[in-house]
Image (spheres, rainbow, N blue to C red):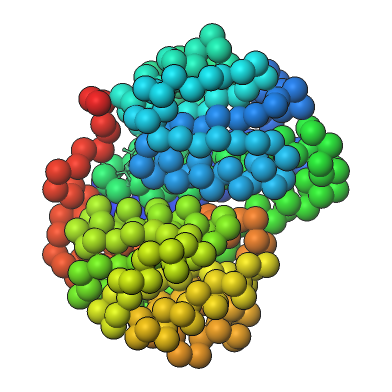
Amino acid sequence: DKAGHKHFMAKEIAEQPTVIGEALSHYVHDAGIDLPQTLDFAALDRIVMVACGTAFYACLTAKYWFEQLAGLPVEVDIASEFRYREPPIGPNTLAVFVSQSGETADTLAALRYCAEKAQIAAVTNVETSSIARESDVNLPIHAGAEIGVASTKAFTCQLTVLVLMALKAAHARGRIDDATLAARLAELRNLPGRLNLALGQAPQIAAAARAVAEAEDVLFLGRGQMYPLAMEGALKLKEISYIHAEGYASGELKHGPIALIDQTVPVIVMAPHDHLFDKTVSNMQEVMARGGQVLLITDSEGAKTASDGTWRTLVMPDCPALFEPILYALPAQLLAYHAAIAKGTDVDQPRNLAKSVTVE
Ligand code: M6R
């Protein structure tokens, strides 16, 4: 049931404020985060995170959170690489497997490789799935069934559960006190409201997407915790609109991809006004100096200081920095969705793709 939407993907994008609220209500109580007692973050030396596709980008985002908030070293890998690499897994390692379906063959194989070597945590959307069942600790994301092949609400619910894990780890390791944790949780409770405001920007995003749909190649740029989201935005666009897109760290631009820039290549810059903003803006200016068309996705402060000379600027609601990757996932999804609509592709069943990849 598409609940009045044209596609499951549109419905699933629109559901995000609600399902993220749901996920929060399962894990957040009063001023604390309820996670299974057996997850002892204070005793950990390191975290290894393994996934495929969009779930991999959720892990890459979480690396920034675990490292910055909890001071925990994190290694993130694609399951198909990890499983054959024979990576050493020391004691005091938590191995986290993120998978919407819980059935992705490579992710399951990577989990089995880690079994008996490390504590295994699963972050999945299907509580009866193989990955959930074979883990020591199962953390459901509570996104509800996701039908569209392009993962949307599962991604933001994965991020929500992962940021809660990172906050819990920071608290358990004495890096944040009770008051700081309570303040972050209060901000998280406001996140669904901010996501609704972002959804309200859909008409402007759709207009930009129609222009992007005319391009053959698109670059997405981001820095810091927005870098994985740049890659996720590119994946979403190529999956459903079949437009070639790449996500890069802004700072990598001059190490190669800037050679691609001309007036036919839209460059989508995901940059809220954070501590790295000025650096991203100078990368953006390098693009504009070469005739590149910049679509800047930022907040009110960012738009005030940096929209001069951009092709378009989309203004997202203001948001505490920590949660911006969740908020900025929405314009990335909507851009891909509306570009696909403009191209007339099969949004929910893109060619050559399956919802669940249960073979290698
Ligand atoms: O079910 P999983 O989360 O393990 O699936 C992983 C990938 O196959 C999946 O995220 C894929 O990249 C999506 N089509 C992305 O939209």
Furthest toward the front, the residue is 255
| Residue occupying image coordinates x 78% and y 46% | 181
**Residue 240: horizontal and vertical position, in percent?**
23, 55
Residue 262 at x, y percent in the picture:
29, 80
In this rendering, position of residue 324 left or right of residue 256? right
Residue 136 place in picture, x, y as percent: 55, 16
Confirm whether residue 14 shows in the render. Answer: no
Q: Is residue 309 left or right of residue 339?
A: right
Front-most of residues 192 and 83: 83
Q: Quadrant of residue 78?
A: top left
The residue furthest bottom is 308
Taking 102 as reference, is 68 above or below it? below
Q: Quadrant of the C terminus?
A: top left
Residue at the image position 16 percent from the left and 67 percent from the top: 343
Left or right, 194 with reference to 350: right
Residue at point 65%, 16% (across, down): 91
Compared to 212, does 36 lie above or below? above
Depth check, front residue: 78 or 211: 78
- Residue 35 is situated, as x and y percent measured from the top left of the image, at 66, 28
Q: For ligand 1, give the image quadrant.
A: top left
Inspect this view and state whether residue 181 appears. Answer: yes
Rendered residue at 54%/62% (across/down): 223
Residue extending farthest to the top is 116
> In the picture shown, does residue 68 fall above or below 264?
above
Q: Quadrant of residue 71?
A: top right
